[in-house]
Image (cartoon, rainbow, N blue to C red):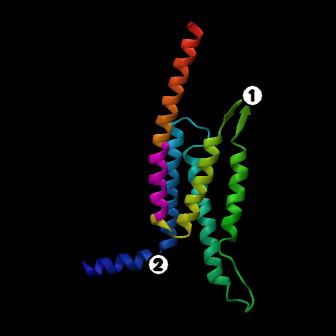
Amino acid sequence: MTDLIAFLSSFFSEYEIYFRIFISAFLGLLIGFDRTHKNKPAGVKTYTFVTVASALITIVSIESVVVYGHMHERTMMDPMRLAAQIVSGLGFLGAGLIMKTGFEVKGLTSAAMILFAGGVGIGIGAGFYGIVIFTIITAFLFIRVGGWIEKREHDKLIVKEDKDLSA
């Protein structure tokens, strides 16, 4: 049994960056499934691409410091520089999802979820599994509560409008 544990530990540490991509893809799929289930424009593929790309760029950024950081004595490398650019790019992508018609705004939650998926990818890419998974569980729990509150408030508004129209 200890041989199996030693083998798995060695295997995981040797191939951890590949697991990061896989876990990121799985979590992006879950986020996208939630959005697809609600018939939103950005779905399973979009969120999977966002999380995997964010994880990949973060891994490349971190690993490039290890590989290239020692080449020149005075070279300073910031491993999170590319992650900062991910956030800028996701803002651009999210802005394309937001539509305004009169007083109605659509796509705001999808844009926020794109940014969230990028954060998930960055976190997994950097190897912060626990906090990312905790964040997803917490966010989805609160999203469910928020959805329930929004539905309740919307139903109250409809009832009030019906009463005002019939009076």
Residue 91 on image: x %, y %: 70, 52
Residue 5, compared with residue 87, is above or below; it is below
Residue 106 on image: x %, y %: 66, 35
Q: Is residue 137 left or right of residue 107?
A: left
Q: Which residue is mark 1?
A: 102
Residue 114 on image: x %, y %: 62, 50
Q: Quadrant of residue 76?
A: bottom right
Residue 15 is labelled as none
Residue 84, compared with residue 160, is above or below; it is below
Magenta range is 131-143
Query: Taken as a whole, is the magenta stretch helix, strand or loop?
Result: helix
Q: Nearer the viewer, mark 2 or mark 1?
A: 1
| Amino acid type for the residue under numbered disc 2 | Glu
Residue 57 on image: x %, y %: 64, 66
Confirm whether the magenta stretch covers residue 22: no
| Amino acid type for the residue under numbered disc 1 | Gly
Confirm whether the magenta stretch covers residue 139: yes
Q: Is residue 132 left or right of residue 65?
A: left
Q: Which residue is mark 2?
A: 14
Residue 49 in view (yes/no) = no
Name the residue at 40% across, 80% down: 10
Name the residue at 55% across, 13% down: 162
